[in-house]
Amino acid sequence: MKHKIGYNRLGRKASHRKALHRNMVTSLFRYERIRTTKAKAGEVRRTAEKMITRAKTDSVHNRRMIARSIGDKAVLAKLFTEIAPRNRNRNGGYTRVLKLGNRLNDASEMVILELVALAENEDSGAQKKKSKKAAATERKGSAEGEQEEQSDVAE
């Protein structure tokens, strides 16, 4: 029975699991979207959410606590200067898991783990592109209308 087991060991020794967590969390913050298995995503998600919550208050102590897990200084700076401020008004739920289906090799369930603020920015970017296209079409339509009016006046 699996009572009171607090986390998924992922079939690895403690040192390997710790390294896996560090690498995957660093990749998530660097690329803001990673493709992985469902089990790994569930564990990495817990770690990432706690880190983002801690990064919302920028202090020396919080930077040092997170730097224990993130070795890359550029990614650490990105977490405190870009990712945490984007989530300032959000109380948890900073990540999203999108199911992709099963992997062909071993049929393990694959997912995309992404930061929610990234997805919201992309959605607004898509709306801006649509509005630019709509505005261009309107301008084009109004320009054609003006040409027709000018030709009517010329006749």
Image (spheres, rainbow, N blue to C red):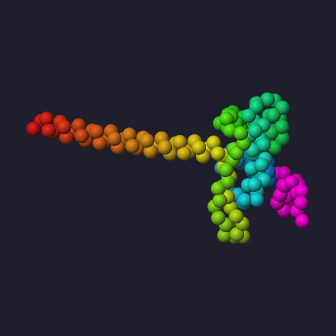
Q: Position of residue 26 (x, y in %)?
A: 74, 46
* Camera-side residue of 105 and 124: 124
Quadrant location, the N terminus = bottom right
In the picture, residue 116 is in which quadrant?
top right
**Start and end of the magenta stretch?**
1-19
Q: Position of residue 151 (x, y in %)?
A: 15, 39
Label the magenta part by its dominant secondary structure.
Answer: loop
Q: Which residue lies at the image location 49% right of the left edge and 43% below the top edge?
A: 127
Residue 142 visible at all: yes
Q: Position of residue 56 (x, y in %)?
A: 74, 34
| Residue 71 in the image: above or below residue 20 | above
Q: What number of labels is visible? A: 0
Q: Residue furthest top?
A: 59
**Does the segment drawn in magenta span residue 8?**
yes
Q: Which residue lies at the image location 67% right of the left edge and 58% below the top edge?
A: 111
Q: Which residue lies at the image location 29% right of the left edge and 42% below the top edge?
A: 141
Q: Position of residue 81 (x, y in %)?
A: 69, 33
* Camera-side residue of 114 and 17: 114
Residue 78 visible at all: no
Quadrant location, the C terminus = top left
| Residue 36 in the image: above or below residue 102 | above
| Residue 7 in the image: above or below residue 125 | below
* Camera-side residue of 117 and 32: 117
**Does the segment drawn in magenta span residue 138?**
no
Q: Which residue lies at the image location 21% right of the left edge and 39% below the top edge?
A: 147
